[in-house]
Amino acid sequence: MTPVPTGGPTAEQWAALRNCESSGRYDAISPSGRYRGAYQFSQATWDWVASFSNPALVGVDPAAASIADQDAQAFALYDRNGGGPWPHCGAHLS
């Protein structure tokens, strides 16, 4: 995993979120195919985060993105919206 930013959730908390969302698998795809990657991003959310954090990632399949890019996208989403984007598993970040 990418080093976590200071002042937020710990590496252990991020690991718990990933485990809850995707059994910790960076290549995970939900049964419907809508949610993808370790943090179970929808493509729309991924593209929105990428638009302000790393425009080169717009259009990239979250499940095919590198571990570092998935982590960075999750950190950027958390910085904007806290744990809310993960309604069931976001409690692990508190």
Image (cartoon, rainbow, N blue to C red):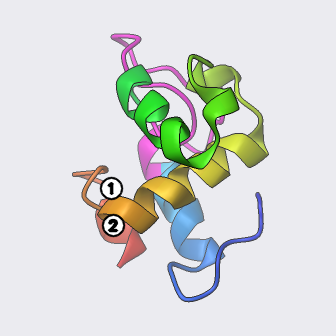
Within 10 Å of disc 1 (Cα), the crowding (few <14, some 14-19, many 20+) is some
For marks 1 and 2, give the one nearer the viewer. 2
Quadrant in which the N terminus is drawn: bottom right
**Residue pointed to by mark 1:** 89
The image shows residue 13 at horizontal and vertical percentages of 52, 72
The image shows residue 20 at horizontal and vertical percentages of 43, 50
Q: Residue furthest bottom?
A: 7
Q: Which amino acid type is marked by label 1? A: Cys
Front residue of this view, candidates 5 and 12? 5
Residue 70 quadrant: top right
Within 10 Å of disc 2 (Cα), the crowding (few <14, some 14-19, many 20+) is some
Front residue of this view, candidates 49 and 40? 49
Task: Write the start and end of the magenta stretch as one range.
Answer: 20-40
**Residue pointed to by mark 2:** 82
In primary-sequence order, the first of circles 1 and 2 is 2
Instruction: Please identify the dominant SS of the magenta region.
Output: loop
The image shows residue 42 at horizontal and vertical percentages of 38, 26
Q: Which amino acid type is marked by label 2? A: Gly
The image shows residue 41 at horizontal and vertical percentages of 43, 33
Q: How far apart are marks 1 and 2 (CA)?
A: 12 Å
Determine the residue positioned at 30% across, 68% down. Answer: 91
Label 1: element kind: loop
